[in-house]
Image (tube, coloured by chain):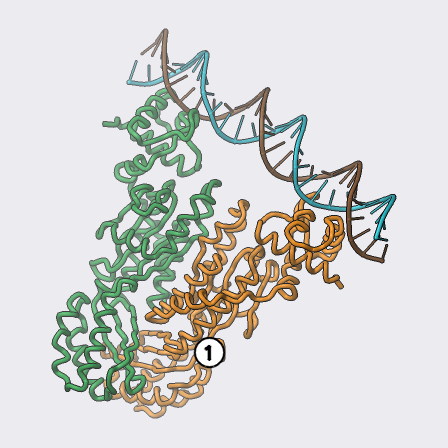
Chain colours: A orange, B green, C cyan, D brown
Amino acid sequence: MLSERRLQVLRAIVQDYVGTEEPVGSKALTERHNLGVSPATVRNDMAALEDEGYIAQPHTSAGRIPTDKGYRLFVDKLAGVKPMSPPERRAIQNFLEGAVDLDDVVARTVRLLAQLTRQVAVVQYPSLTRSTVRHVELLSLAPARVMLVLITDTGRVEQRMIDCPAPFGEASLADLRARLNSRVAGRRFTDVPRLVEDLAEAFDIEDRGTVSAVLSTLLETLVEENEERLMIGGTANLTRFGHDFPLTIRPVLEALEEHVVLLKLLGEAGDSGMTVRIGHENAYEGLNSTSVVSVGYGSGGEAVAKLGVVGPTRMDYPGTMGAVRAVARYVGQILAES
Amino acid sequence: MLSERRLQVLRAIVQDYVGTEEPVGSKALTERHNLGVSPATVRNDMAALEDEGYIAQPHTSAGRIPTDKGYRLFVDKLAGVKPMSPPERRAIQNFLEGAVDLDDVVARTVRLLAQLTRQVAVVQYPSLTRSTVRHVELLSLAPARVMLVLITDTGRVEQRMIDCPAPFGEASLADLRARLNSRVAGRRFTDVPRLVEDLAEAFDIEDRGTVSAVLSTLLETLVEENEERLMIGGTANLTRFGHDFPLTIRPVLEALEEHVVLLKLLGEAGDSGMTVRIGHENAYEGLNSTSVVSVGYGSGGEAVAKLGVVGPTRMDYPGTMGAVRAVARYVGQILAES
DNA sequence: CCTGGCACTCTGTCCGCCCGAGTGCCAGCC
DNA sequence: GGCTGGCACTCGGGCGGACAGAGTGCCAGG
C-alpha cells in the first residue's frame, strides 16, 4: 500500500529517532537523509503514515515517533540484520573461549551480550528437556543416604539427595549405577521415563524401595520446571534511557526478577530463527515499553535454549539482532566443543 | 559529650527522616516525639549536632538530615536490632524449607531477604575455602577423558573436565577414587593440598600423568577465586528511593553487576557478628550513597559465607538488621540439615 | 538553661510570557 | 496528479518575577 518513498520516510524516522531519542520533524528528515523531496512533501507522507498507525506525535506540533506497529514494519521489511565485523567476531570468540564450566559459559555470555548491545542480556541455561544424558552417578554418602548426580551433554550437572527407605549396599549401588547408565546414557531426557520403567524389577525385594526412590528422584529432576534457569546481566544499561525513566524502569526490573515470566517469554518466541517482540506484543505488561530480541542456541543443529536482550522499543534493531545472532552462534560452538 | 537529650534528638531525626524521606525541622520533631521541650530548644540542640557533624542541612533554611556519621552513631548507640515477630520467623522457615538443592536455597534466601527488607539482597554461595570435602567422584566419559565432581558438606557441587595424557583404565580410576576419598573426605579444603601431595607415587608410571592432571585440577578447583559466587535479588526496590534517583541508581546497579566488587565488600566485613557499612565507609565509590548490612552464616558454629542487603543510607537499620540476622540464622539451620 | 518572639533566608511553585519548532492546509507550478 | 513554497496556527519548554511556607538563628526575658 505504502509507496516506496513513504517506506523510506518511515525508515528514516526510525533511524533518526533511535539515534536522537527525540521526535523527528519533517525538516530535519530532509536535511539528514537525501530523500530528494521537500519538507512539505514529507509532511504529507508523514500524515499518511500517521493515518495508517505507523507513527504518532506525542503532542500536537511536535515531531513524530514510531509506534510499535511502525517498528514492526521497520524490522520486517525495512531493516536487515547488521553483521558483526570480523574484529568483533574474534573478540566474541576469545571472550567465550576462556570459560571453565557451564556456569562460566553462561556468565560470560550474559556479560558479553550486555556489553555488545548495551542493553539487558538474558541467557537461558541449556534446557534439560532437550538435552541428552551423559552420565548418571550414584554416591553413597551414608548407609541410607544416596546422592544422585546427573550430567548432561551440555555440561550441566544436577544433584539431589535421596533418603533411602532401607540401607543400600555398595554392591547394589554399583549394580544400579551400571544398569541405569547402560539404559539412559546418550538418550534424550524425554525418553528416560520409558527406558527405566521396569528397572526396579531386576532387584531384590528389599532394595526395590530404594531403587524406586532413586528412579523417581531422577524423573523429578528431569521434569522439574523450576530447573529452567537463566541469568541476567547489564541491568545498569536500563538507566541509559529516558529522563522519564523512573516510571518505566521499575516494572522492567520487576519483570527481570521474575525468571518464570522471562522463561515463558522466551518459550513463546519462535523455536527457530530470531524473534523480535516489540512493545505491546509482549504478553507481560511490565515489558510493554520494551522490545525483546531472542534466538535459540544449541550445541548441534538443534536449539537447547534461548538467549536474548531486553531493551527499549527505541533500540537499534539491526545492530542488536546482529549481536544476538553472533553470540548465539559462538555459544553453540563452545558448547559443542566441551 | 552529647547530652542525653541531644542523642534523643538525633534518634528522632533519624527515625523521622527514614520515615518521611524529607529533611526534618525542629517544629515537626517536637510534635511527633514528646521530647518535653520547645522547638527553640531543639534548634539549639540541632545546631550543636550539626557542629559535631552528625546532621546537615541540604540548604539553608531547610530541615536537617543525618550524615553518615549521624547514622553511624545511631546504629552504634541509639538503636537496637529489631527482632522478627514469631509469624515472620515461621514464614521465613517455611519459605526456606521447600528448597531442593543449594541453588534453590540461595535463590530462596535472596528472594526472601529482598522481600523482608524491601531492598537489594546479596547472598554469597557457601565458600569453598571454608568447607570440607564430602566426596570426590571421578567419571570416565571417554578412554582419555575424566570428569571430576567435587561435593562439599554445604551441598555445593563443582565439576571439571580433564583430558588425560594417556588412556586411563576403569580399575586405575576406581583405585584413584578410593585413595582420594579416603584421604580427603571430611577434611577441610585448606588441608587437601598437603594430603594429596604424594598420591601420584602409588601409581604405575604410565598412569602418573593422568593422576597428576586430576590432582592439579582438584587443587585448582579448590583455590579458584572466581568460584566465589553470589546471587542478587530485589533490584526493583532501588526504584523506591528518591526522585533524584536516575543519578544514584546507575552506579549501584553497576556495582551489583560487579560480583567481584561485592565479594570484596563482603569479605572486608567482620567475620563474626553483623557489619553495617554506611555511605562513604564503603570502599567502592558507586556504593557511597548506600549502606550495606551483612552477616556471616554457616551450617555449624562457623560462618561459611555471608549475606546481606544493600540499601540507601536512609534505611530502617533496626528492622533491616533484624531481618538479615534472622534469615542468616535460618539459612544456617537449613544447610546443617541437608 | 529553657522559651517565645521576630526577622531573615531559602526553596518550590505558580503564573504569564515569549520563542521556536513543527504542523496542516492551500494555492500554484511542473 | 503529485510536488512545492508559503502562511497561519498550535503547543511545549524556558525564563523571570511574585508568593507562600517552612525552617532557621538570634536575642531578650523568665
| Residue D27 against residue B161 in the figure, above or below | above
Left or right of B50 on screen, residue B177 = left
Residue B112 is at least partly visible in this image: no
**Of residues B325 and A311, the one drawn nearer to the viewer in this rendering:** A311
SS for dot 1:
helix
Q: Quadrant of the N terminus of chain B?
A: top left
In this figure, which residue is indicated by the disc labeled 1?
A130
Q: Residue C19, how many percent across, how many down?
A: 66, 32
Where residue A212 sits, quadrant-wise, is bottom left
Q: Residue B201, how many percent across, how many down?
A: 12, 81
Residue at x 42%, y 32% (from the top left corner): B23
Where residue C9 sits, quadrant-wise, is top left
Residue at x 40%, y 48% (from the top left corner): B251
Q: Quadrant of the C terminus of chain B?
A: bottom left
Residue at x 32%, y 56% (from the top left corner): B260
Q: Label 1 is found on which chain of the structure?
A: A
Residue B250 is at least partly visible in this image: yes
Amino acid type for the residue under numbered disc 1: Arg
